[in-house]
Image: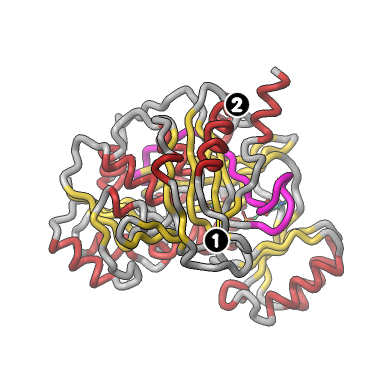
Amino acid sequence: MNVLIIGSGGREHALAWAIAQSRELDHLICAPGNGGMREIAECVAVDPSDHDAIIALCLEHDIDLVVIGPEGPLAAGLADALEHARIAAFGPSAAAARLESSKGFTKTLCKAHNIPTADFGCFDNADAAKAHIAEKGAPIVIKADGLAAGKGVILAATEAEALAAIDDMFSGVFGKAGHEVIIEEYITGEEVSFFALTDGENVLPLPTAQDHKRVGDGDTGPNTGGMGAYSPAPVLTRKMKKRVLDEIIIPTVKAMKDAGTPYKGVLYAGLMITAEGPNLIEYNVRFGDPECQVLMMRLKSDILPALYAVARGDLKGIKLKWKKDPALTVVMAAKGYPGAYDKDTEIKNLEEAARDHEVEIFHAGTRREGGRVFAHGGRVLNITALGDSVRHAQTKAYMAIEAIDWPEGFCRHDIGWRAVKREETL
Ligand code: AMP
Ligand code: GLY
C-alpha cells in the first residue's frame, strides 16, 4: 500500500514510525512532515489546507490511504474532499469532527443521549452569560465554543475572574472560537485519555494514557499541548473502562450514526474520573499528542490494516495486540514555550541518546539541514521509552535526555509521577 500522512508533529512521527514497520507498506509520504519523519518517509511540502493539491499528490503517487493527524484539516473537511475523490481517508468528516470543533455540539449531544458530562449552558451574549455566572457562583469553567488550540478554557476560581473571562471572550480574544461561550460546572477528579478506533459502527478500544498538560513540574504553570504522557493509565481499571465504553463512547458513536454523520477515525475522550464515575470533559477527533507516541511504542500488531479498515468501514473482526510493558514519553520544548521561544537552535547527539533499543526519539518541531537537526517549533522532541514499570521507562527516558545536547531546550522532570507513586505504594 502507498500511504500519505498529513501533519508534522510528534504524533505524526510516531504514526509514521509504526506504519513504516508494516508488512503491507510500499511507499510512505508525509505532508509536510518534519526533521524526524524525513528519515523514514518522503516528505513533501504540500499545504494540508489546499485540498486540490493533496488530491493531486494522492493521484500522482497512487495513494491507497491518507492518515490525517491533526484536527485542523479534519474540521476543514479534508476527509470529505478525499472521499469525494474516492481516496480512502483515516479521520472523520467535517460534520463528525464537530465533536472537537464545537464544544456546544458535543455538550448538546451528551445531554440528548444522557452521556455523563458537567452541567452547562451555551451563551451567545455577555449579559445572559454573566447572569448565569451570578446564579451558579464560583468555581466555574468558561470555554470558547470553537477550536482555540487548547487555550480557550478558563477555570475561574472566583466570580470576578469568571466575569472577566466573559468580557475577554466576547471582545474577541479568541477570535471566532469565542463567539459562543459554554459555561460549565467545575468538576474534580483524575484526568485520563481514552482512545477508540471506530468505523462509524464498530468500536475497538485502544490502551489508555495520561497526559501532563501544565508546563511546570508538579502540574504548575500554564496549560500546553501536553508535556509528557504514559500508558497504560492505572486510574482506568477494567471496570471503569467498561463504563466509559458503555456510558460514553458507544452512545456517542450510535448517536453520530443515527444523525446521518457517522464518525470514522480515532475518537479521543478526555475524561475526568470523579467519585461518581467517568465524566466526559471533551472529545478530540484525532490521536492525542503526545499520547499517540506511547500508544505506538506499545503496539505489537501491524497498525496499517486497522487504519485501512476504519477508513473502509470494515473494522469488525480487527484486533490489535499491545505490549504489557508501560511506555512513557517526555516532551522537550524550546525554552519559553508555551510563550515566545527561539527557533533554529541546533540539537546534537540524538543518535547516541536513542541507542537503547527500547528508546525512540520522535520529532515534533524540528527541521533537518544536511546531517544537522534544528528546533523549529514549541514542542520539539518526544523522548519515549518502554520499561518493566513506569519508573523504569521514566528512568530510561530521562537518561536519554541527559545525553541530548540542546542547551536551549527544557522538559518537565516528573512525567509519570502519579503512576510512579501508585507503583511505590503497591
Ligand atoms: P478542555 O480544553 O475542554 O480539555 O479543557 C482543558 C482543561 O481544563 C481540562 O484538561 C481540564 O483540566 C480542565 N477542565 C475542563 N473542563 C472542566 C470542568 N468542567 N471542571 C473542571 N476542570 C475542567
Ligand atoms: N495531549 C492533548 C491533546 O492532544 O489534545
Quarter holding the N terminus is top left
3D distance between C-alphas at marks 2 and 1: 29 Å
- Give the residue at mark 1: 105
Give the x, y percent position of residue 72.
43, 64
Q: Amino acid at mark 1?
A: Phe
- Give the residue at mark 2: 237
Q: Is residue 161 visible?
A: yes
Give neighbour class at mark 1: few <14, some 14-19, many 20+ (Cα, 10 Å).
some
Give the x, y percent position of residue 370.
30, 60
Residue drawn at x 27%, y 42% as measured from the top left: 20
Q: Nearer the viewer, mark 2 or mark 1?
A: 2
Q: Amino acid at mark 2?
A: Thr
180 lies above or below 352: below
Q: Which stretch is magenta?
A: 199-223
The question of residue 208 being in magenta is answered with: yes
Answer with mark 2 or mark 1, whichever residue precedes in sequence.
1
The quarter of the displayed image where residue 161 is located:
bottom right
Left or right, 297 with reference to 236? left
The question of residue 141 being in magenta is answered with: no
In the image, 329 versus 132, the foreground residue is: 329
282 lies above or below 232: below
Tell me, what colour scheme is on the image? Answer: secondary structure
Judged from the image, the secondary structure of the residue bearing numbered disc 2 is loop
Give neighbour class at mark 2: few <14, some 14-19, many 20+ (Cα, 10 Å).
few
The quarter of the displayed image where residue 71 is located:
bottom left
Give the x, y percent position of residue 198.
38, 42
